[in-house]
Image (spheres, helix red, strand yellow):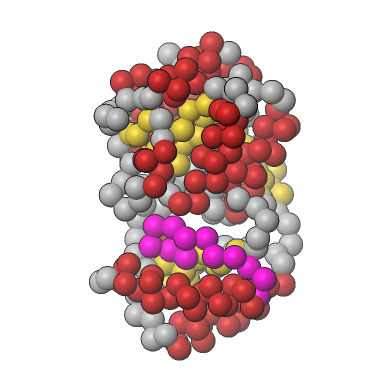
């Protein structure tokens, strides 16, 4: 498959059918989008992440024309809204923390964190000290989850691999699960992923004419799994990968591969001519 910024120039036959169905009946189509690595470039400091220029404008143009438009992210929903500049986009839903949090029309709904998160938060410094984690390793506290980043390390993959088994053991003791990502391991409550979040949104909106999801990281595979199920049931779908050199799994399963967040914005700009 070729890469490119024209949606129709770099898409599989099944994806082209999905795109045609979406364009034929956009008012009953649903589009889901990851945030980091898809709508926003990956950066060393998660707090410095901001949406790709043009991303919010593209979403604002699409929202009134679609049956559903959602940002589905591991970030807290309110943070994604702030960093994305999404406040004021009517019709946009932001599903944060893999669907546990929801922002819509300026209203943010956040559940209470399970007790395992507080226990993991208290024990995590000791775990990092025990493995002599490099000082560049840092923890992003999301409230409902804890993300351990190694991107700043001289050898980020080596550091990640050293932490993997210990963090898995901590997750097991505290009733959490480990979500791997691009030089990050996130400890979060089980039972929700991007596939579940997107499925719940589809249930709200009724039978879709087409479903599109765009992502870049391992956490987006669950959404791709759902789209594969929908396609098998006859629903037109489009799986879009925001390509990178760090994760190949999504590109291998995507209908279209675009050049990172700039390519995603270009794709969205051309989605509904």
Q: Residue at x 40, y 20 (%)?
A: 13
Q: Quadrant of the C terminus?
A: top left
State which quarter of the image contains the N terminus: top left
The residue shown at (45%, 88%) is 130
Q: Where is residue 120 shown, x and y percent of the image? A: 61, 76
Above-or-below relation of 213 to 144:
above
Residue 92, image x, y percentages: 60, 33
Asked whether residue 265 appears in the rendered view, the answer is no
Classify residue 189 by image quadrant.
Answer: bottom right
Which region is colored magenta? 174-185
- Give the image location of residue 180, x and y in percent: 47, 60
Residue projecting furthest to the top: 24
Q: Quick one: which residue is furthest to the front in this view? A: 232
46 up-or-down from 33: above or below: below
Q: Residue 5: tell me if it is visible.
A: yes
Above or below, 151 relative to 212? below
- Which image quarter: residue 270? top left
Q: Position of residue 30 (x, y in %)?
A: 59, 27
Tell me if residue 147 comes above or below residue 65 in the rendering.
below
Residue 260 magenta: no
Q: How many marks?
A: 0
Question: Closest to the observer: 138 or 237?
Answer: 237
In the displayed structure, does residue 247 sit left or right of residue 2? Answer: right
Q: Residue at x 49, y 43 (%)?
A: 34
Left or right: where 260 falls relative to 88 = left
The residue drawn where x is 43% and y is 63% is 184
Q: Is residue 179 located in the magenta-colored stretch of the structure?
A: yes
> In the drawing, does residue 11 fall left or right of residue 192?
left
Q: Quadrant of residue 65?
A: top right
């Amino acid at each position: 498959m070729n890469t490119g910024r024209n949606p129709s120039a770099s898409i599989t036959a099944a994806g082209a059918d999905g795109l045609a169905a979406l364009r034929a009946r956009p008012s009953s189509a649903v589009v889901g989008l990851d945030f980091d690595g898809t709508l926003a470039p990956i950066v060393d400091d998660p707090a410095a992440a901001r949406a790709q220029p043009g991303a919010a404008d593209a979403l604002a143009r699409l929202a009134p024309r679609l049956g559903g438009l959602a940002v589905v992210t591991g970030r807290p929903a309110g943070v994604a809204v702030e960093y994305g500049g999404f406040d004021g986009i009517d019709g946009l839903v932001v599903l944060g923390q893999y669907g546990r949090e929801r922002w819509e029309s300026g209203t943010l709904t956040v559940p209470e964190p399970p007790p395992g998160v507080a226990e993991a938060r208290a024990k995590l410094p000791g775990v990092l000290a025990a493995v002599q984690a490099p000082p560049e390793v840092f923890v992003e506290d999301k409230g409902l989850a804890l993300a351990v980043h190694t991107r700043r390390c001289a050898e980020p993959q080596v550091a990640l691999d050293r932490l993997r088994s210990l963090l898995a053991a901590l997750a097991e003791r505290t009733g959490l699960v480990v979500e791997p990502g691009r030089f990050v391991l996130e400890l979060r409550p089980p039972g929700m992923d991007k596939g579940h979040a997107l499925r719940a949104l589809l249930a709200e909106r009724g039978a879709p004419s087409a479903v599109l999801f765009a992502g870049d990281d391992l956490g987006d595979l669950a959404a791709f799994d759902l789209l594969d199920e929908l396609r098998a049931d006859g629903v037109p779908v489009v799986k879009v990968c925001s390509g990178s050199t760090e994760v190949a799994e999504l590109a291998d399963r995507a209908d279209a591969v675009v050049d990172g967040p700039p390519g995603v914005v270009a794709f969205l700009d051309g989605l509904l001519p």
